[in-house]
Image (cartoon, helix red, strand yellow):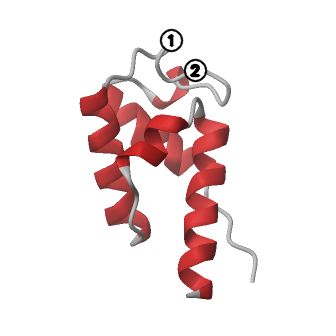
Amino acid sequence: MELTVDVEELRTIVARSLELEPEEVGDGDHFAEDLEMDSLMVLEISSQLEQRYAVPVQDTSIGSVQNLTELRALVESLLAEESSA
């Protein structure tokens, strides 16, 4: 079973946490350097992802991704792990 995550939905989650408009969050924008994401924002995004996708998301996992493309890959891999467990 292929698990894909809607990138626009992720963009909205990230934008809301950063208090930006979704169109201000590009796929390749670096979270820390371009969007000024801090550790509190990482916690908020982790919490929102856990609620939305019902998978445990460690803050360290989110902290290691640098952009929306990597975040999508991370969430898809977490969903795949959950479905195979």
The C terminus: image quadrant: bottom right
Horizontal side of residue 43 vs 79, given as left or right: left
Q: Residue furthest right?
A: 2
Q: Are marks 1 and 2 in contact (CB under 8 Å)?
A: yes
The disc at residue 5 is: none
Q: Residue furthest bottom?
A: 85
Amino acid at pointer 1: Glu
> Quadrant of residue 15 in the image?
top left
- Describe residue 70's horizontal placement relative to residue 42 as left or right: right
Dot 2, crowdedness within 10 Å: few (<14), some or many (≥20)? some
Give 11 or 42, whichever is nearer the viewer.
Answer: 42
Q: Which residue is mark 2?
A: 30
| Image side of residue 2 versus residue 13, left or right | right
- How crowded pointer 1 is (Cα within 10 Å; few <14, some 14-19, many 20+) is rated as few
The answer to whether 85 is drawn above or below residue 36 in the figure is below
Q: Residue at x 63, y 63 (%)?
A: 77
Above or below, 78 relative to 70 = below
CA distance separating discs 1 and 2: 5 Å
Q: Position of residue 18 (x, y in %)?
A: 34, 26
Q: Which mark is residue 33?
A: 1
Amino acid type, mark 2: His
Q: Nearer the viewer, residue 17 or 58?
A: 58
Report helix, strand or loop for mark 1. Answer: loop
Say which element carries label 2.
Answer: loop
Position of the N terminus, as image quadrant, is bottom right
Pinpoint residue 42: horizontal percent, then vertical percent.
Answer: 34, 37
Tell me what residue is drawn at x 63 percent, y 62 percent: 76
| Residue 2 locus on image (x, y percent) | 75, 75
Residue extending farthest to the front is 60
